[in-house]
Amino acid sequence: MKILMTKYSGAILGPIALVLGFVLGGIYDFIKLITGGHVENVGISIIILTIIIYSCLYPLTYKQQKFSRLTQKMSPELQEIKKKYEGKRDQESMQKMNMETQAVYQKYGVSATGTCLQFIIQMPILFALYRVFYNVPAYISSVKDIFITPAGSSITDQIMNTPGWQDKMTNLVAGFKNLTALRADFFIAESSNFLGQVASATERQQNFIVDVLYKLPKEGWETLTSSAYFPNLTNADVVEQAVNHVNNFLGLNISYTPWDYITAWFNAVKDHTGEGTALFGFAFLALLIPVFSYLSQVLSIKVMPQANTTGNDQMGAQMKSMNLLMPLMSFVICFTVPVGLGVYWIGSAVVRTVQALIINKKLDKINLEDIIEKNKEKAKKKREKMGIYENQIRNNAQLRTKTNVQFKSLLTDEEKEQQLTKATEIKVNARPDSMAYKANLVKEFNERNNADKKSDN
């Protein structure tokens, strides 16, 4: 397996990022192949990856919408149960309410956690994709080739052949805020191990250089080729143009964050550099990423059937809160993550919207009453099985009671007298703070009470 620079090596997200990066790289190379090398674009690859991911998640999306439709139908029954036990907080009433509520869920064949599974699956994918988009060359070998070919005269080779290059690259990283997350200790001559692949010190250093160059802004490339750093690089302009080409999506670089563009424009205006007008266009486009992310999330939620949230339906209230919170979260988060992740988020919402419209039409043709009747039969069979099990327990209990009675009938009069004497001694000698003493008091109270009732009659 070919060593590909600095992949994320987390125990959970690392393997997920590796798989998603492999698929993204395959999509990128396939597009490049079928277009004869004319189309090399990470943004387009991200959109296709989004479609593939949500096509795989379609069964869960269908199940979620079906759950929402059935929830609408069963909501009145749940409200009746809540109304029935309103104000009752004793243990017995709470148990009965829970049992009746569970019976309604079984009747309609849904689970209270019906929409959680898709959310649980989506979140690790989203976090793993952040790692992929943050370090695209680590997962797409064709993008990394821009920096390391041709062998011997590539930009990475030229940098590493310059005396004192480690210090120069370290200073370059320190000079740009968007590079501060990169670790300068990759220059240390040590080997690393990722999923069993050992990289040499040279490979680690080369990978770090690619990390830095991939994230360099326009002024970063100017600094790189200045007299204080690497003025003798022969192909820096070609590499910069190639990187901008593959990262370009509607004029934005998918490796930058919208906040990078907005702050660059703000700084240009503040410093009166004359680039404020040009940078305003990029800042405006970058601002549209979180805005469209928010709007697309809202749209995808609107076309999904929603459960009724009347009364004090806790589950419905939670769903309503989540529907309000998730679009706002996407709006805020999209400012500080790579544009590529924002594109994925927008694309995923659009795909979910299309899927929801298709599923809605499909569900309109399905008789939900038939589904409910089938679920009733399943619930009935389940209760019958539970009833058989309960009868078995009851019969076993009766059998043990019968055995004890039969055992007692086998005792002689002398043995019965001995047991009675022993029980009396235990009763007399019981400590005032013991359970036996308290049980005797209760027994005596019941006996006196029964005797009083008989005398009254």
Image (cartoon, helix red, strand yellow):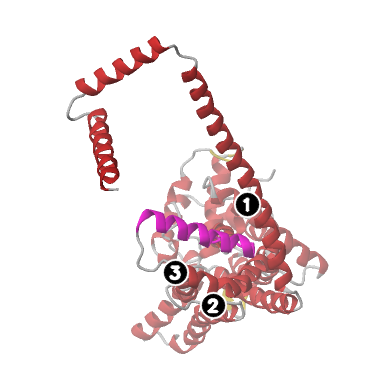
The part of the image, by quadrant, that contains residue 375 is: bottom right
Question: For this view, does 20 lie left or right of residue 223?
Answer: right
* Residue drawn 43% across the image and 51% down it: 184
Neighbourhood count class around disc 1 (C-alpha, 10 Å): few under 14, some 14–19, many 20 upward: few
Is residue 414 visible to the viewer in this orientation of the structure?
A: yes
- Say whether marks 1 and 2 touch (CB < 8 Å): no
Pick whichever of labels 2 and 3 is earlier in the sequence. 3
Q: Which residue is mark 1?
A: 383
Q: Is residue 107 magenta?
A: yes
Instruction: Report the Cα–Cα distance between label 2 and label 3.
Output: 43 Å
- Tell me, for residue 293, which label it has, or none: 2
Q: Is residue 354 magenta?
A: no
Element under label 2? Answer: helix
* Residue drawn 66% across the image and 65% down it: 63
Question: For this view, does 60 lie left or right of residue 362?
Answer: left
- Secondary structure mostly taken by the magenta-highlighted segment of the chain: helix
Pick whichever of labels 1 and 2 is earlier in the sequence. 2
The amino acid marked with disc number 2 is Ser
Instruction: Report the Cα–Cα distance between label 1 and label 2.
Output: 46 Å
The amino acid marked with disc number 3 is Lys
**Where residue 385 appears, x then y in whole percent?**
65, 46
Q: Is residue 327 above or below residue 24?
A: below
Highlighted range, magenta: 90-114
Q: Which residue is mark 3?
A: 84
Pick whichever of labels 3 and 1 is earlier in the sequence. 3
- Say whether marks 2 and 3 touch (CB < 8 Å): no
